[in-house]
Amino acid sequence: MHQIGLLFGSFNPIHVGHLALANFAMEYAPFDQIWFVVSPHNPFKDRKALAPAQSRLEMVAIATKEEPRFKICDLEFSLPTPSYTINTLQKLKESYPDNHFSMIIGSDNLLNIDRWHDSHRLLKEHSILVYPRPGFPLENADITHSKTVKVLKAPVLEISSTLIREGISEGKQLRFLVPSGVYDYIKNNRLYNST
């Protein structure tokens, strides 16, 4: 049985924080592989702010190509939108019965998990690994009773896709906040109003 960590996201764009977290989780959780599950449309995100889904998928491919244990999962591209995590997890379990999947989420998501579709099932039936996010202390989350939620004491990185998008739209040179090749992809494809 392979242990697979699932990092869900819009990856709009993927940045070095995503890769650092995936690297840390793979070594310390530990996982055999980390799958980057690209969401075409997260129900909590404004669709207008999203780069095209195919572009985001291609940026994840560029970012992960040098680590064979990092895989891209585009399963949600074939599921109805908006993407509900519970449906994706169910489909993954059916499609890959030899793998054990664990979601990797930030403490911000854990503290708001009751807003997720079918959150009670999510917490009861699926393994969840939580990492700290700035401003969302895990002490505020009641996970003491949970058999499915574990904490990963990963370094706290204050890099966000929002910061990168806003900076690029303002003409800032943010090459080193995104993985090698991704910045050129953003510029060449004029994403986030880059010129």
Image (cartoon, helix red, strand yellow):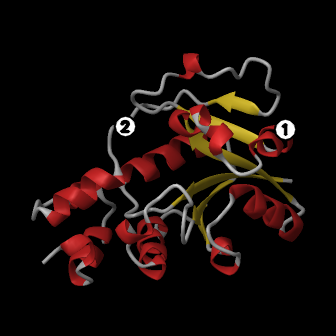
Decide which of tag 2 and tag 1 comes sooner along the chain.
1
Q: Provide residue 21's location: percent of width, then percent of height.
A: 49, 44
* Residue at 86% over, 43% down: 125
Determine whether 134 is above or below 179 in the image.
above
* Residue 29 visible, this angle: no
Q: Residues within 10 Å of mark 2 (few under 14, many from 20)?
A: some
Q: Secondary structure at mark 2?
A: loop
Q: Provide residue 45's location: percent of width, then percent of height.
A: 47, 58
Q: Provide residue 46's location: percent of width, then percent of height.
A: 43, 62
Q: Who is closer to the viewer here, 6 or 43?
A: 43
* Residue 140 visible, this angle: yes
Give the quadrant of the C terminus: bottom left
* Residue at 68% over, 60% down: 84
* Residue at 88% over, 61% down: 98
> Label 2 belongs to which residue?
157
Quarter occupied by residue 34? bottom right
Q: Who is closer to the viewer here, 29 or 84?
A: 84
**114 to the left or right of 194:** right
Q: Real-space Cα distance between discs 2 and 1?
A: 29 Å
Q: Who is closer to the viewer here, 78 or 157?
A: 78
Q: Who is closer to the viewer here, 25 or 186?
A: 186
Q: Residues within 10 Å of mark 1 (few under 14, many from 20)?
A: few
Residue kind at label 1, given as amino acid type: Lys
> Label 1 belongs to which residue?
124
Q: Secondary structure at mark 1?
A: helix
Q: Using the image, tell me which numbered label, if any, was put on residue 176.
A: none
**180 to the left or right of 7:** left
* Residue at 68% over, 73% down: 75
Residue kind at label 2, given as amino acid type: Leu
Query: Foreground mark, 2 or 1?
Result: 1
